[in-house]
Amino acid sequence: MPAAQIATHTRTYSRYGREAVIVLGQLIRINRIERKLSVAQLAERVGASRDLMQRIEKGDPRCGIGIVFEAAAVVGVPLFEEEFG
């Protein structure tokens, strides 16, 4: 009897989605460097691993949105424009 096959599903992302994740990662990296933080220091402040921070900065779309937003907030990347009335 053959070994059981595990079905895998590869997630595809739109070009717009991929580019947005890459740009956000680049902005996080630029702001981190401007604040003179190492990847390890940012990871510690965010509560994530150094490896995860590197993946975020490289634009890996599989990273959790909450941790990506937290990293952006720590280094001062604005995520949304506020409306002033």
Image (spheres, helix red, strand yellow):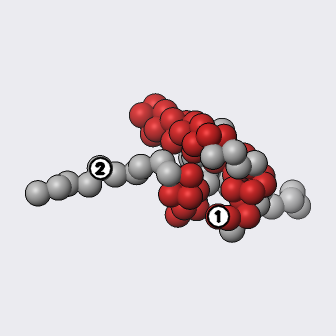
Residue to which mark 2 is pinned: 81
Inspect this view and state whether residue 12 appears. no
**On-image quarter of the C terminus:** bottom left
Q: Identify which amino acid the numbered label 1 is placed on.
A: Val
Residue that sits furthest to the bottom in the current view: 47
State if disc 1 and disc 2 touch (CB < 8 Å): no
The residue lying at 63 percent from left, 46 percent from top is 35
Task: Say few, some or many: other residues with alpha carbon within 10 Å of mark 1 (under 14 / 14 to 19 / 20 or more).
Answer: some
Q: Mark 2: give few (<14), some (14-19) or many (20+) Cα within 10 Å.
A: few
Res 26 quadrant in image: top right
Q: Which mark is residue 54?
A: none
**Element type where label 2 sits in the image:** loop
Q: Earlier in the sequence, mark 2 or mark 1?
A: 1
Screen quadrant of the N terminus:
bottom right
Q: Is residue 3 left or right of residue 34?
A: right
Q: Which residue is mark 1?
A: 46
Q: Name the side, left or right, on which 22 lies relative to 45.
A: left
Give the secondary structure at mark 1: helix
Quadrant in the rendering for residue 14: top left
Left or right relative to 11: residue 78:
left
Q: Report how far apart the C-alphas of labels 2 and 1 lie in the structure.
A: 22 Å
**Foreground residue, 17 or 3?**
17
Q: Residue 66, percent across and down?
A: 52, 63
Numbered-mark total: 2
Residue at x 50% of width, y 51% of height: 76
In this view of the protein, can residue 2 be seen by the observer? yes
The three-letter code of the residue at mark 2 reads Glu
